[in-house]
Image: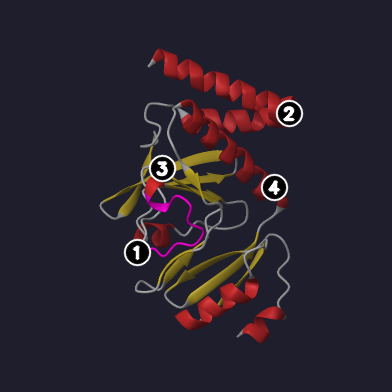
């Protein structure tokens, strides 16, 4: 499997699927791919997907991450970001790499850890997925019990909250209740294209502070 995998050249925006991949082969492939790479993987019941994102995918990921960090900072909530860490559970035969993720409620439980095993460690409280050319694997996130999932696709933000084992679309985030993020985040993302990154981030931080003052 490793020798075959090295022959694949996955252009940005494309993906490949490998079927009948055992857990041991999945682990070997992750090791073969290495940690410092541009591709993302999803593993679900012996089917492995490997995808290479487009540049606009990475840009949206970074800016939305900045917005989340500003929200958490201004609300004085401790958090631990773990980026595209591979989350996996051998018993479930599932694994996923979010575009970014945050430990918030469970921050203290994973503080300082570089590698996590979801058969032992808690799942992240929030995961981000930027769907430019890929689809979000909601069933994997739900099985791994990730409390909240944000999907950004076609300049729209969707907030999915885990309830009774399945995701339900919500108008508000359970982590940032009463903030109209579905409307505001896409608006500030568009503003970056004309006003620039730093100016937009300052404006967003000011907006968050105003919401806190009004609460």
Report the Cα–Cα distance between label 1 and label 4: 35 Å
Answer with mark 3 or mark 2, whichever residue precedes in sequence: 3
What residue is shown at x 36% (from left), y 43% (from top)? 105
The picture places residue 55, in percent across and down from the top left corner, at 72, 51
The picture places residue 41, in percent across and down from the top left corner, at 56, 66
Left or right: residue 7 compared with residue 134: right
According to the image, label 2 marks what residue? 196
Q: Is residue 119 above or below residue 149?
A: below
The picture places residue 142, in percent across and down from the top left corner, at 36, 57
Q: Is residue 179 visible?
A: yes
Do the residues bearing badges 3 and 2 touch, measured as CB atoms within 8 Å?
A: no
Specify the label residue 104 is tagged with. Answer: 3
Report the Cα–Cα distance between label 4 and label 2: 16 Å
Answer with mark 1 or mark 4, whichever residue precedes in sequence: 4
Answer with mark 2 or mark 1, whichever residue precedes in sequence: 1
- Magenta region: which residues? 109-119
According to the image, label 1 marks what residue? 120
- The quadrant in which residue 1 appears is bottom right
Magenta portion: prevailing SS class: loop
Report the Cα–Cα distance between label 3 and label 2: 29 Å
The picture places residue 87, in percent across and down from the top left corner, at 46, 62
Which circle, 4 or 2, is nearer the viewer?
2
Secondary structure of the residue carrying tag 1 is loop
Report the Cα–Cα distance between label 3 and label 1: 17 Å
Q: Is residue 101 above or below residue 78?
A: below
Specify the label residue 56 is tagged with. Answer: 4
Answer with mark 3 or mark 1, whichever residue precedes in sequence: 3
Left or right: residue 49 compared with residue 163: right
């Amino acid at each position: 499997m490793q020798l075959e995998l090295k022959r694949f050249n996955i252009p940005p925006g494309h993906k490949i699927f490998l079927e009948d991949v055992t857990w041991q082969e999945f682990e070997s492939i992750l090791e073969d791919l290495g940690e410092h790479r541009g591709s993302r993987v999803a593993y679900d019941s012996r089917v492995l997907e490997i995808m290479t994102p487009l540049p606009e995918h990475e840009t949206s990921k970074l800016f939305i991450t900045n917005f989340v960090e500003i929200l958490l900072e201004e609300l004085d909530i401790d958090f631990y970001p773990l980026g595209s860490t591979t989350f996996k559970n051998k018993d479930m035969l599932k694994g996923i790499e979010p575009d970014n993720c945050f430990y918030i409620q469970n921050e203290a439980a994973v503080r300082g850890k570089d590698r996590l095993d979801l058969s032992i460690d808690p799942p992240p409280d929030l995961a981000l997925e930027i769907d430019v050319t890929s689809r979000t694997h909601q069933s994997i996130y739900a099985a791994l019990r990730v409390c909240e999932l944000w999907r950004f696709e076609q300049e729209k933000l969707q907030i999915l909250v885990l309830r009774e084992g399945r995701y339900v679309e919500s108008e508000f985030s359970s982590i940032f209740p009463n903030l109209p993020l579905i409307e505001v985040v896409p608006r500030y993302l568009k503003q970056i294209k004309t006003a620039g990154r730093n100016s937009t981030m300052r404006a967003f931080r000011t907006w968050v502070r105003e919401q806190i003052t009004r609460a």
